[in-house]
């Protein structure tokens, strides 16, 4: 992807500063939300139950009911290790065009997608 003046205006300021060598990369990474990896706010207990059911049933229809894989890849801590949380969150929210992975933005917020990613990276809770 080539950067144009118009596309640069859409980038976060921190990325532009690094690209122009105005800010050391390690300083930018330390300041970025993705690097902080702070715990995501938990949804309400009722919504938490809905999200667990959504992941176990809807996501499970492609990723396996135990999330060990199927049409889609496994969603277990070992298989997600090293994958950026923000990338996983974007995949949930926006899907993967040209693949069977649909966007879920009509059904959950970005914060809820972040919570799902956090739970998947830890080991997703069972339905109760």
Image (cartoon, rainbow, N blue to C red):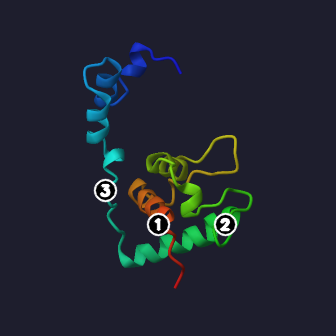
| As drawn, 65 above or below 2 | below
Report the residue at 34% width, 60% height from top: 40
| As drawn, 59 above or below 21 | below
Q: Secondary structure at mark 3?
A: loop
Q: CA distance from mark 3 to mark 2?
A: 26 Å
Report the residue at 58% width, 48% height from top: 95
Judging depth in this view, the residue of 24 and 119 nearest the camera is 24
For residue 122, the mark is 1
Question: Outermost residue, bottom direction?
Answer: 128
Report the residue at 63% width, 67% height from top: 67
Please state if 96 lies on the left or on the right of 87 as rendered: right
Please state if 20 lies on the left or on the right of 64 as rendered: left
Q: Which residue is mark 2?
A: 68
Q: Which residue is mark 3?
A: 38
Find residue 50 and report its horizontal and vertical position in percent: 49, 74
Find residue 93 and report its horizontal and vertical position in percent: 51, 51
| As drawn, 118 above or below 8 | below
In the figure, residue 78 lies in which quadrant?
bottom right
């Amino acid at each position: 992807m080539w950067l144009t003046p118009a596309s640069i205006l859409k980038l976060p300021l921190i990325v532009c500063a690094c690209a122009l060598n105005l800010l050391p990369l390690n300083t930018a990474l330390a300041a970025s939300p993705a690097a902080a990896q702070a715990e995501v706010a938990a949804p309400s207990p009722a919504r938490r139950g809905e999200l667990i059911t959504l992941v176990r049933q809807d996501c499970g229809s492609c990723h396996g009911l135990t999330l060990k894989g199927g049409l889609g890849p496994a969603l277990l801590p070992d298989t997600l290790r090293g994958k950026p949380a923000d990338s996983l969150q974007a995949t949930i929210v926006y899907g993967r065009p040209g693949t069977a992975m649909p966007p879920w933005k009509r059904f959950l917020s970005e914060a809820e997608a972040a919570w799902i990613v956090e739970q998947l990276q830890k080991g997703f809770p069972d339905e109760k």
